Image (cartoon, rainbow, N blue to C red):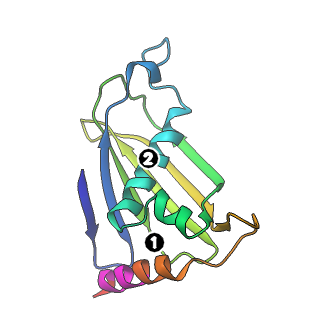
Amino acid sequence: MEAYDMKSEKKIIHKTQLRPRYGEVDRMGYVYHANYITYCHQARTELLREFGINDSVLEENSIMLPVISMDLRYFKPAYYDELLTIKTVIRKLPEVRFHFEFEIRNEAKEKVCTANSTVVFVNSATRKPVKVPELIEEIFKQELEIACV
């Protein structure tokens, strides 16, 4: 896994890699289309983990991150055991909603799939949307400021 990479424009980029397992491939030999959602979720989780935000931290702070929108576009199939690189991009500070962009490429660096996902910060006790928790806001505010320098 490659750590995040800051560019001069305001965005955070993180890359992670995975290999589709045999059970994730359909009869045609392609990665089944719904598995790309799981891959994006895994990439988002790894990006947050790089910044010290994992599911335990969220749970300790009574925060859930349900997905409220997910949009995928497929370009070419991926195959069993093919190394895939998932680039995750954050372009702006989260508020109540937190937006992620994904690009999945195969070993030949060909674009396989792109996706956009939005999650919302929700208080786990009330099940109501809340403003981004301060601990998360501070982490990404600092990182996005560094990206602008």
Q: Which numbered dot is residue 71?
A: none
Q: What element carries label 1?
A: loop
Q: Is residue 97 above or below residue 39?
A: below
Residue under the image location 45 percent in, 41 percent down: 39
User: Where on the picture, by quarter, is residue 83?
Assistant: top left
* Residue that sits furthest to the front in the current view: 60
Distance from the alpha carbon under mark 1 to that under mark 2: 19 Å
**Residue type at mark 2?**
Gln
Q: Is residue 104 above or below residue 78?
A: below
Question: In the image, is residue 108 part of the stretch drawn in magenta?
Answer: no
Q: What element carries label 2?
A: helix
Residue 35's spot in the image, x, y percent? Answer: 51, 33
Residue 139's spot in the image, x, y percent? Answer: 40, 79
User: Where on the picture, by quarter, is residue 119?
Assistant: bottom right
Q: Is the magenta stretch mostly helix, strand or loop?
A: helix
Q: Which numbered dot is residue 91?
A: 1
**Residue type at mark 1?**
Arg
109 lies left or right of 55: left
Q: Start and end of the magenta stretch?
A: 141-147
Residue 92's spot in the image, x, y percent? Answer: 49, 76
Residue identified by numbered label 2: 42
User: Where on the picture, by quarter, is residue 149?
Assistant: bottom left
Q: Nearer the viewer, residue 95 or 27?
A: 95
Residue under the image location 38 percent in, 80 percent down: 144
Residue under the image location 35 percent in, 68 percent down: 51
The local crowd at label 2, few if under 14, some if 14 to 19, many if 20 or more residues have their Cα within 10 Å, is some
